[in-house]
Image: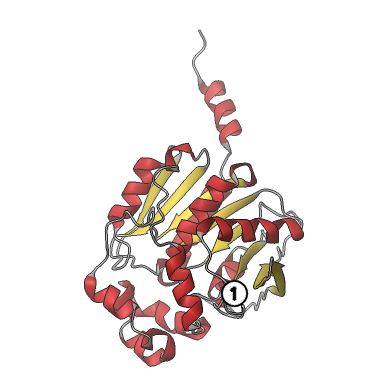
Amino acid sequence: MSTESHHLPEIRFEKIGFQKLRTAIWHSQTEHKKTPLLFFNGIGANLEIAQPLGEMLKDRDIITFDLPGIGGSPRPLAPYRPWWIAYAARQILKRNGYDKVDVMGVSWGGGAAQQFAFQYMKRTNRLVLAATSPGVIMVPGDIKALTKMAHPMRYISQDYLVQHFETLYGDEQSGAHMFAEHMKPPTVRGYLAQLSAMAGWTALPFLRFLPHRTLILAGDNDKIVPLANGRMLKFMIPQSRLHVIEGGGHLFLLSRAGEVMDVMTSFLDGPDNAELAMLDGALAPAR
């Protein structure tokens, strides 16, 4: 995924209680802005990894932030839970003048996106869940991938990451160098706080109540979050559809960017429920 256009975000720090969070906003480069997109990143991932979204979705604002101890955010001052992540995101949106947004979460961030959509139903327009699961109740990934995932060398050494990229994520090597280039090691305290935030959490009790049109993206070669989890989300979320990336691993957003962005933009720009109801009415046979 090329970044030649250098569409860089505005970086600022937002204070949520006593906690500072490094926040990024990629501003739309078109006159007619579409619905802003709130993005929740994967575990240990700094906001720079969202740069490809800013490069390819230039017709809408994209908002994301580093969690405590991740990227450029100071270390966590206290443990936190998913409800606080959603609350922090809502405060950042409010302070920057955003009301209703599309919401996207990748991997670990998919859990945060589900929590936000439930906690702030009226502030959520559409929901995109990529390479994720409903939480602790999930089909586990490949043990070899999970073992390497936990290895600190994944963050310390770019060579290690590139060398084991396919085993880790199930993706082609094409996305390895870009991922390694944008990645910044999290602090140990920050990583453990993010890991423990989702301990025991599951979205299964509330997924049936989500009213939003939802796109579920899953790779059939994902070593960390197997495709079965995408099927579970599809079964539980009423207005959802599942798009399978054939041969896609855990980082298909990088390795299969063009294909994924086409699917995403078609979904995000598609008619809403009211428009679909009017269309169904217009096409219904006369009685």
Instruction: Name the element at disc 1.
Output: loop
Residue 211 placement, left or right of 155: right
Residue identified by numbered label 1: 77
Residue at the front extreme of this rendering: 78
Towards the viewer: 78 or 15? 78
Q: Give the percent coordinates (x, y) of residue 194.
A: 48, 70
Colouring of the image: secondary structure
Residue 228 can be seen in this image:
yes
Drawn side of residue 212 relative to residue 32, left or right: left
**Drawn side of residue 19 relative to residue 205, left or right:** right
Residue that protrudes farthest toward the left in the picture: 143
In the image, taking residue 13 as reference, residue 84 lies left or right, namely: left
Q: Residue at x 40, y 67 (%)?
A: 252
Give percent across and percent down for residue 147.
27, 77
Residue 278, position as x, y percentages in the image: 59, 26
Image location of residue 285, percent across then percent down: 49, 15
Q: What amino acid type should be assigned to the residue bearing mark 1?
A: Leu
Q: Is 76 rendered above or below residue 235?
A: below
**On screen, residue 170 above or below 107:** below
The image quadrant that residue 86 belongs to is bottom right
